[in-house]
Amino acid sequence: METLTPLLVLSTIGSLFLLFNVLKLLKIVTFPILNHSKLSKYKTENSYALVTGASEGIGKEFAFQLAKKGFNLIISARTLEKLETIKKEIELETKVKVIVIPFDFSTTEERNFLEFEKKIENLNLTVLINNVAMNHSIPTPFLEEDEKLVQNIINCNITNTLKVTKIFLNLAKRENRKGLVVNVGSVAGLAPSAYLTVYAASKSFLRSWSIGLAHEVKSQGFHVEHVNTYFVVSNMSKIRKPSFTTPTPRNYVKSVLSQVGNSFSSTPYFSHAVLGYVIGFFSEKFLASTSASMHLNIRNRALRKRERESKNVKKEE
């Protein structure tokens, strides 16, 4: 019996481990079936949704899909021309109102945010999509990265996301409105990422802050949700072709809006949830080492490309 006891313990632990992971897989499969979108809770008469980083990619798609669901829009990004084009396209396809607010989220001047708040304070704003983000142009060692870019990433991904969220929540509280905040996260925030250190750290911060804030404001009628985003076809990811694990912005946003409102941190796109499940089996050390090798390889290829382009320019001259 003494020799069986350790075997019994190991068998029990193994069975519990297997059961735990089977339940996790079942949750991934059943979550979108059992948990329907709560977006309609925030759709009231003449309600508005604010989308940051709305000039392209995921942000642009959030704007289009929210408009099709009947939300009036406030779309914000740095480039006015792109926003005006999107406004015309949305107004041709839907009957919603679209307000354009060009805004550079890499700056932190207080007067800019006071002006931003004045433009939206009298609107029935019930949804905020914090999508705007900045990344490194290519993977770059921290000590070699441009100091201005480092500060811009911090301003855009952290400081100004907090400021816009605070404005949104305070305006909603003042008018006794419910509110939904969706913070678009990144797989880069799941583990330390060498050569993308500042961007990855900003996304790790976003996840922690978002979940903590969700607990603080849930009793006040607000739902804050951090959305785990893996690779999506976009200019930022530099991926041009969709695949099973890399959806188009349209398919990705559709999955987010079809499930939003049920969790403080979600991974709504199915293949992304599966990837997250697999990643969970590996240690942080392994993930950090693997991403460091991958990013260094990407960096070297990008530098070689720059060198070729530079030589071609010189030849043309």
Image (cartoon, helix red, strand yellow):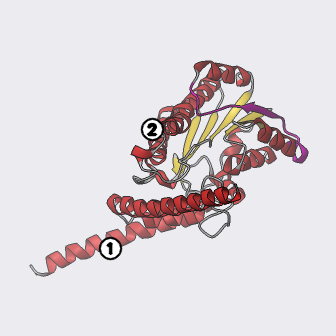
Q: Kindly identify which residue carries mark 1.
A: 15
Q: Residues within 10 Å of mark 2 (few under 14, many from 20)?
A: few
Q: Hey, which residue is sitting farthest right in the picture?
A: 92
Quarter of the figure with the N terminus: bottom left
- Say whether residue 9 is left or right of residue 149: left
Residues in magenta, as a range:
91-108
Check whether the beta carbons of the residues at disc 2 and disc 1 lie within 8 A of each other.
no
Quarter of the figure with the C terminus: bottom right
Q: Kindly identify which residue carries mark 2.
A: 212
- Count of all numbered marks drawn on residues in the image: 2
Judge whether 64 appears above or below 180 on screen.
below
* Magenta-drawn stretch contains 95: yes
- Say whether residue 156 is left or right of residue 202: right
Percent of width and height locating residue 306: 58, 57
Label located before the other in sequence (2 or 1)? 1
The residue depicted at 50 percent of the width and 65 percent of the height is 275
* Magenta-drawn stretch contains 106: yes
Percent of width and height locating residue 111: 62, 18
Q: Nearer the viewer, residue 165 or 53?
A: 53
Q: Nearer the viewer, residue 240 or 75?
A: 240
- Residue 27 seen in the figure: no
Percent of width and height locating residue 222: 58, 35
Q: Residues within 10 Å of mark 1 (few under 14, many from 20)?
A: few
The residue depicted at 41 percent of the width and 68 percent of the height is 21
| Three-letter code, disc 1 | Ser
| Three-letter code, disc 2 | Gly
Secondary structure beneath dot 2 equals helix
Percent of width and height locating residue 57: 69, 51
The residue depicted at 73 percent of the width and 43 percent of the height is 55
Q: Nearer the viewer, residue 238 or 157?
A: 238
